[in-house]
Image: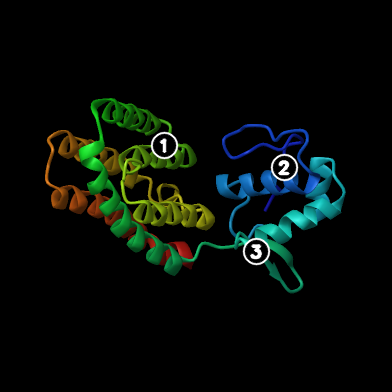
Amino acid sequence: MTDAAVAPVPVTQDGAEIAPGSSKSERSYTAIKARILEGSFTPGYRLVLAKIAADLGFSVVPVREAIRRLEAEGLVTFKRNVGATVSGIDPTEYLYTMQTLSIVEGAATALSAPLIDSVATARARAVNAHMRECLEHFDPVRFTALNQDFHSILFEHCPNPHILDLVHRGWNRLATLRSSTFRFVPGRAKESVLEHEALLQLIEAAADADTIERAARQHRIATLDAYLAHAPALTD
């Protein structure tokens, strides 16, 4: 596999440059993690410390520190006689995360629904429109980011802080798994956009909490089912 170059100026996942005052270890960590999350460094990719350090203009020491930190987060694995490699996506962990998220996010969305006003639904619909545009020249990383923005608008008003914390933990876990399901099953993206609109219509119609919760939960489960249908091929 051809080594993917690391940009000389470290940036965050959304393209923002790291503050010049950040330590070299922090800047190395942010640059490497961004490329793992965006898919430039794919599962199994060998992280050659000397090359990464040269691309960043640093010594090997801060890069090694950054990779140890990423190992602690589960994004990097050390293999004997190989060194540091990007961790693979564990289908079982993805299954458990999505099952849990479907329950807690469904509940959070249902509890938020009475508090979602026309301004919020307009914001959500605008994000969904960007997702629809994204289908033309599909970018799974951008689509996934927009998808999180959309759902955040719907559950951010949840009055139960404990449920909301569980939702955030679920989304953070998906980020750790680098699980953009849409990268593997892009056909699911179009269905997701349609389901978003249906969910918004339920909220605008003041549907009962059970109906909204079921719709939000089923929306998440449909994405999980799409992934699992392709999981054997992905893990061969």
Other residues around mark 3 within 10 Å, as few (<14) / some (14–19) / many (≥20): few
Residue 145 placement: quadrant: top left
Query: Visible in this render: residue 66?
Result: yes
Q: Residue at x 24, y 26 (%)?
A: 118
What residue type is disc 2 on? Answer: Ala
Residue 74: % across, % down:
60, 63
Q: CA distance from mark 2 to mark 3?
A: 24 Å
Colour convention of the picture: rainbow
**Image position of 214 with respect to 27: above or below:** below
Q: Which mark is residue 146?
A: 1
Q: CA distance from mark 1 to mark 2?
A: 26 Å
Of tags 2 and 3, the one toward the viewer is: 3
Other residues around mark 2 within 10 Å, as few (<14) / some (14–19) / many (≥20): few
Residue 197 placement: quadrant: top left
**Image position of 205 with respect to 168: above or below:** above
In the rendered structure, the answer to whether residue 86 lies left or right of residue 94 reads right
What residue type is disc 1 on? Answer: Leu
Q: Earlier in the sequence, mark 2 or mark 3?
A: 2
Q: Earlier in the sequence, mark 1 or mark 2?
A: 2
Residue behind mark 3:
72
Q: Which mark is residue 5?
A: 2
Looking at this view, is 105 or 225 the one in front? 105
Q: Earlier in the sequence, mark 1 or mark 3?
A: 3
Query: Visible in this render: residue 48?
Result: no
